Amino acid sequence: MRSLERAIDILEVVDSSHHALRLTDIARRAGLPIPTTQRILSVLEARGRVERDAHGYRPGVGLVFGAHAYLTTSPLLTAARPVLQDLAAATGLTASLFKRIGWSRVVLARVTGAAPLRYELPVGERLPLHLGAGKALAAQMSDEELTAYLDQLTDHTRTDGTVVDRAALAAELSSIRALGYSQARGEREPGMASVAAPVPTPDGEATAAVQVTGTTADLPEDRVQELGAELQRAALAISRRIP
């Protein structure tokens, strides 16, 4: 089991980087000896899970197989796709589904609205929990979990350079829990706005969220409450469709 955990640690290090990493960098970030790291990387490379060139190691094409299998068999995605289509058609905004994994969230699906977004957000993109739709998921954390998340956070800035204040964020997350939805304006992309709601689960620990996104002109403040209610209905519809 320890060998498996180490291999996953290394894969997560490689996966979280936006560029190739040297052996020494991977070993340091994974907290492993260099010889151990090299042995594991050799196995992963032989299986196509990592690739190596003159710049170092990066994720390998073999990871696509696992991603495709998840996207085609996930009950959450099967339940969400028609709801996202209806949501995009009804609001004219781009509808997306996110799922939390660890201290990040990942884009699982999206349906473009009447006005396509001016930036690309690929399926599989790793995004923060303290900005944008991530706040709908961060609001589901316990106080202890939120403290641990913020303690390890290295980038506390929004896209406009303003710093995320811990006390202000905690207060906002409390408000989100009470409202049942979150909103964001220009937090990750200038001129963009979003509203998101967590997908409820029987155990109350929501790890997925549905979101609509558009420009600030498409999503003015006086539309937020209406969209919040629409997203809560969509989130509940997804939850009920999951077997």
Image (spheres, rainbow, N blue to C red):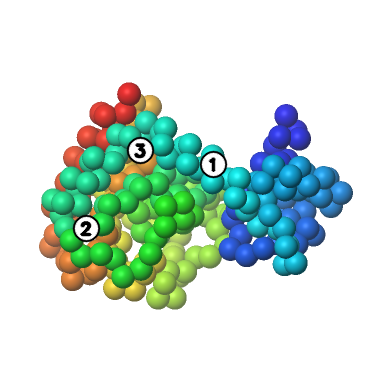
Q: State which quadrant residue 221 falls in.
A: bottom left
The mark closer to the camera, 1 or 2, is: 1
Give the amino acid type for the residue marked by disc 2 in the picture: Gly
| Residue at the (35%, 48%) spot, across then down | 109
Residue 117, horizontal then vertical, whole percent: 29, 66
Residue 183, horizontal then vertical, whole percent: 28, 57
Residues 51 and 191: in front is 51
| Residue at the (45%, 59%) spot, across then down | 166
- Neighbor class of circle 1 (other Cα within 10 Å; few <14, some 14-19, many 20+) is few
The mark closer to the camera, 1 or 3, is: 1
Q: Do residues under tags 1 and 3 come within 8 Å of each other at their CB atoms?
A: no
| Mark-to-mark CA distance, 1 and 3 | 17 Å
| Residue at the (42%, 69%) spot, across then down | 158
Mark positioned earlier in the residue sequence (3 or 2): 3
Mark positioned earlier in the residue sequence (1 or 3): 1
Q: Which residue is mark 1?
A: 65
Give the amino acid type for the residue marked by disc 1 in the picture: Phe
User: Which quadrant would the C terminus be assigned to in this image?
Assistant: top left
The outermost residue toward the bottom is 161
Q: State which quadrant residue 180 falls in.
A: top left
Q: Which residue is mark 2?
A: 113
Q: Which residue is mark 3?
A: 77
User: Which quadrant would the N terminus be assigned to in this image?
Assistant: top right
Left or right of 56 in this view: 128: left
Give the amino acid type for the residue marked by disc 3 in the picture: Leu
Mark positioned earlier in the residue sequence (1 or 2): 1
- Secondary element at image label 3: helix
